[in-house]
């Protein structure tokens, strides 16, 4: 499956609005990806140029009527799209708490630098010193976005791996497992050197995540026939997903990635509906796909007491 991620909201300290990181998970089995792309392109082509920004559709520029048509013509028609959403209200997370988290992360990076030098890995140490310098200058908004993105990535990985195995059984197609990919909108990390730093932070997050969270492996098949082990190796009783964060988690330009534009539109619909009671028809339909047993919708209130 291809997972595309975008965010909406200012993430300003003290804000009473809900802000969002949204992931859309797009099925790749049996040409479903191409079908959804075609549906999106037909809808996007119907939008007047006056609502485009440098030729690109942006959710914030669209009136409700076009967001509702997007819901009806793209989201609510087969093949189905899956979603994962992290919502946060900045007023529930103080600047002092975020500064406490920042100091904890800085200390963790300093420990990595020290350990690298003790083991004569000078190039690693210098690389992490760049990350440290960048991290020290991060403001409240970026710190909160990092937490939301990490939470959403973990939620999304479990969701897509679970669905990918089910869809293999339904479709007899391994594409959703074999071609697993994450595309994150790069708008808030525009500089190339910063993308590299974010990439390393996410690599460290994936490493921590796979140690503390069990990856769902369904037991419908014998191990030698299991589709998950045709793609991922087993390591210490779990899955080796290094390729996911090393090669398949990328920061991309939404202009060239329709999936990210789709995530932007989904985020805009939920943001308008839950903050302003607008876009009601589309907002209610989206919420029907979120929460409950699916565990794909989280209101995040950061709490660092267990870590710090």
Image (cartoon, rainbow, N blue to C red):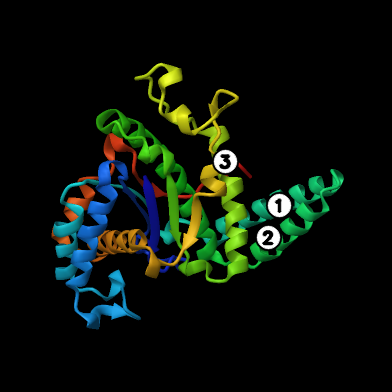
- Give the mark toward the camera: 1 or 3: 3
Residue 295, percent from left and from top:
34, 38
Whether residue 88 appears in this view of the structure is: no
Q: Name the one closer to the observer, 52 or 302.
A: 52
Q: CA distance from mark 2 to mark 1?
A: 8 Å
What is the quadrant of residue 63 in the picture?
bottom left
* N-term-proximal mark, 2 vs 3: 2
Whether residue 195 appears in this view of the structure is: yes
* N-term-proximal mark, 1 vs 3: 1
Q: Which mark is residue 242?
A: 3
In this picture, residue 124 sits left or right of residue 267: right
User: Does residue 266 sit above or below 55 in this rendering?
Assistant: above
Q: CA distance from mark 1 to mark 3?
A: 21 Å
According to the picture, the residue beneath numbered tag 2 turns out to be 131
The reply to whether dot 2 and dot 3 touch (C-beta < 8 Å) is no
Q: CA distance from mark 2 to mark 3?
A: 21 Å
Location of the N terminus by quadrant is: top left
Using a 10 Å C-alpha cutoff, classify the residue at mark 1 as few (fewer than 14 neighbours), some (14 to 19) or many (20 or more): some
Residue 94, percent from left and from top:
51, 59
Residue 271, percent from left and from top:
29, 62
């Amino acid at each position: 499956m291809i997972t595309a991620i975008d965010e909406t909201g200012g993430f300003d300290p003290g804000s009473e609005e809900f802000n969002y990181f949204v992931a859309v998970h797009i099925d790749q089995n049996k040409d479903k990806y191409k079908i959804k792309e075609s549906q999106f392109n037909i809808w996007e082509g119907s939008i007047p140029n006056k609502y485009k920004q440098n030729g690109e559709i942006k959710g914030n520029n669209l009136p409700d009527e076009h967001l509702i048509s997007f819901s009806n013509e793209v989201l609510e028609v087969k093949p189905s799209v899956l979603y994962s959403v992290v919502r946060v209200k900045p007023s529930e997370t103080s600047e002092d708490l975020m500064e406490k988290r920042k100091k904890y992360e800085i200390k963790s990076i300093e420990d990595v630098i020290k350990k690298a030098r003790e083991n004569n890995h000078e190039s690693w140490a210098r690389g992490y010193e760049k990350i440290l310098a960048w991290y020290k200058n991060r403001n409240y908004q970026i710190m909160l976005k990092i937490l939301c993105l990490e939470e959403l990535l973990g939620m999304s990985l479990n969701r897509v791996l679970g669905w990918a195995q089910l869809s293999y059984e339904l479709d007899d197609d391994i594409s959703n497992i074999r071609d697993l990919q994450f595309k994150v909108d790069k708008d808030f990390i525009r500089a190339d050197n910063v993308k590299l730093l974010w990439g390393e932070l996410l690599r460290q997050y994936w490493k921590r995540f796979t140690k503390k969270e069990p990856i769902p492996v369904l037991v419908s098949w014998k191990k030698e026939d299991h589709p998950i082990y045709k793609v991922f190796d087993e390591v210490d009783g779990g899955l080796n997903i290094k390729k996911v964060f090393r090669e398949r988690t990328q920061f991309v330009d939404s202009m060239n990635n329709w999936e990210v534009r789709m995530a932007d539109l989904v985020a805009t619909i939920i943001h308008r509906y839950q903050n302003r009671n607008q876009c009601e028809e589309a907002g209610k339909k989206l919420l029907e796909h979120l929460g409950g047993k699916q565990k794909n919708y989280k209101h995040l209130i950061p709490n660092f007491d267990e870590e710090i």
